[in-house]
Every structure is written in structure tokens, then in C-alpha cells.
Image (cartoon, rainbow, N blue to C red):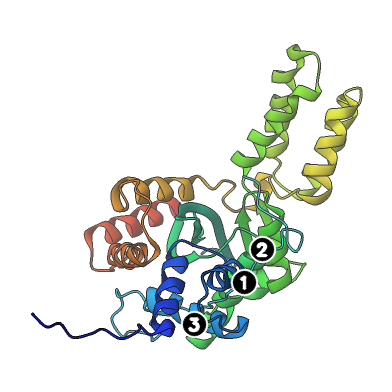
Amino acid sequence: MLLKRRGKQCPAGIHIFVIDELFKMKVKPKHTLEILDEKGFPVPKKQQLSNYLTSSREKLLQVDTSIIPDDDKPWVLKYHVECEDETDDDDENEIDDSDDDRNKFQFFVAIDLRGFPCLIIGTTDMIKQFHRYGFAVCTNEKEKDFKFTFIYIRDGLRDSNLQMDEQNLVLIADGSEAIRNAFSKVFGTDRSIVICWAHMRKRVEKQLCLVEDKNLHTEIMDDVDTLQLSKDKKTFEIATKLFLKRWKNQEQFIHYFSSEWLESKNGWYEGLEVSSTNNALEATNRAIKDEDTLRERLVLARFTAVLFLIVNKWSGERNPAGKDFVQEREDRVKYICP
């Protein structure tokens, strides 16, 4: 039996296959070039590889940024694909662990999928109810990632002719320096930043170890709880002076509390008249994991499809003709005009 002699396989086709496999394995571009060289395959230029990987990511996401007339159909506000050799940990700060006449962003890192943090974004209305309206999937949880998200929210709303009162914008988030710095750089340093009270309280409790007498721990936290109830800035400032005076003998704890929660992050008291916790975001996070992803770690392409289904469901729940929406409006009227 005669068989057709196979010629030498095209090395270019093979090295593209190798690049694709290494891309799926999340191998860094720099290391990919080294592997190709070791195996004797044609080695592309660094920029050529970067362009190819960027194109691969865009195809993977199947990005569509066109605004769909259908009110309930999700769409991509903006996207940016970047190919980096290494992440410089020194460049940005890492993360640690609406309305009356103001807009209130709530921003929180909610889900981790295959190493890509998924950020839930929403707004708070005049009776402090949270309304989620979108996601951002980033590479890391650093200042530049949050800055990217805030910039595209701002520019995307402008491009879509949607109004946002930037002059009276308020951010509600945990105590992350990365989120706060990114927000200030995009919207200005004169914007109000509210620290989630639940996150703040947990962090303070962890530092009670600085107070040797354990019998004082409950008393100190009671005073912190009282501080949080301050109805305005003047009351808060007076109350903090009394707090510092009372516990001045606990030097280590007072130094921590002053530097961490009074000098830089002091937006955690009730007088700011906005939602003081991220509890609604936490609940949204749990619902997504329990109902939508079933607590599985999904690949990015699959998770993108899931995100579109989630946002479509959220939009459907806001249908003015829907029973739940009508009931919600009635509850708000009762709350505002008892």
C-alpha cells in the first residue's frame, strides 16, 4: 500500500499552536519567548507577540461595545486589553484583603474567577437602598485597575448621554487605599469618600490586641460605636476629642486609631447621610455565587456569558411594569411620607 509522503510541517504553524497553549496556561509573554527559543521554534518580536495575545484576548471575550436599543440587554461600556510581561508590585497600592441631590457609587471586590477579580458596581438611592447595575473584570486589584474602571464609568456615561452629577459624587467602599486613590485621581480630591462601617469596625477590633487589659476592649468598642452615630461633622470632631482624651493612656491603640481612622479615613460616621455599610453588596456577592455561578470557578469566556445573564436579570427586575418594582415604589413612598 502506497502512502503519500508527508512533507516537513510548517514551523510557523507549530509555534503559533505552542503560543496558544502557553496563553491558556497563563504563561507570561517573556517566558513564552524563552520557551520558543529553547524549543527551537521561530521567536517573534516582543511587540508581535503582544499584539497577537491582545487579539486572542479580544476574541476570547467576544467584546461588543454597541449600545442595544433593548432596555434589558446588557452591553459592554468600554474595554481595554493590555499585555504585560510582569506586574510591578511597587507601582500601585494593593488592596488588603442614587439619591437625594448626590450620586453614591458603591464599589467592592466581590468575586475571583481564574485569578481575575470581578468588581460589582452600583448606586445608593435616597433611602439608602442599593441598586446594582454593572460589573468590571480586571487583571489585578490595584490602583490602576480601579482607575481604569472609574474612568470608563465616567466617560461611558458621557458618551451615552447619561447624566452624572460629578460635583456631588460620593464613593462608598471599604478602607482600601487603592480604591480611594483611584477615585480621587479620576473625580478629584474634594469628593466625599465613605468608609464601610462594618469593615472599619472589624479592623479596629483586630487591633484591640494593642490594649493589654482585655477588660477594656468592650468599653473601647462601645465608645467607637458611639462615635459612629455622630449626626454631623462638628459632633464627630467633638466626640473624637473626648474619645482620644479618655483613652490617651492606651498609646499604641490611640496612635493606630488616630492615624488610620481619623487623619486619613474618617468618613465612617452616620452624619454623612449615606449608606454606612457595604452589606447590600455582600448580599449581592453571595447571591451571584449561590444562584448564578454555583460557587464554581468559571473560565473567563464562560463567566462573561454568565455576567450578561445576571445583568439582564437585574434589568428585568427594574421593569416599571413589574410587580416587585411597583411594590418597591410604594414602600419608598411610605418611607418618605409616612
Badge 3 amino acid: Tyr
Asked whether the beta carbons under mark 3 and mark 2 sit within 8 Å of each other, the answer is: no
166 and 208: which is toward the camera = 208
The residue carrying mark 1 is 84
Badge 1 amino acid: Glu
Q: Which mark is residue 87?
A: 2
Q: Which mark is residue 107?
A: none
Residue shown at 74% from the left, 12% from the top? 215
134 and 246: which is toward the camera = 134
Is 31 on the left or on the right of 182, as rendered?
A: left
Mark 1 falls on what kind of element?
loop
CA distance separating discs 2 and 1: 7 Å
User: Is disc 2 surrounded by few (<14), some (14 to 19) or many (20+) residues within 10 Å?
Assistant: few
* Position of residue 290 measured from the top left corner of the image (x, y, whole percent): 32, 45
Asked whether the beta carbons under mark 2 and mark 1 sit within 8 Å of each other, the answer is: yes
Is 335 on the left or on the right of 320, as rendered?
A: right
**Residue 242 in view (yes/no):** no
The residue carrying mark 3 is 52
* Position of residue 7 measured from the top left corner of the image (x, y, whole percent): 30, 86
* Position of residue 266 measured from the top left corner of the image (x, y, whole percent): 76, 48
* Position of residue 135 measured from the top left corner of the image (x, y, whole percent): 45, 65
Residue shown at 31% from the left, 77% from the top? 71
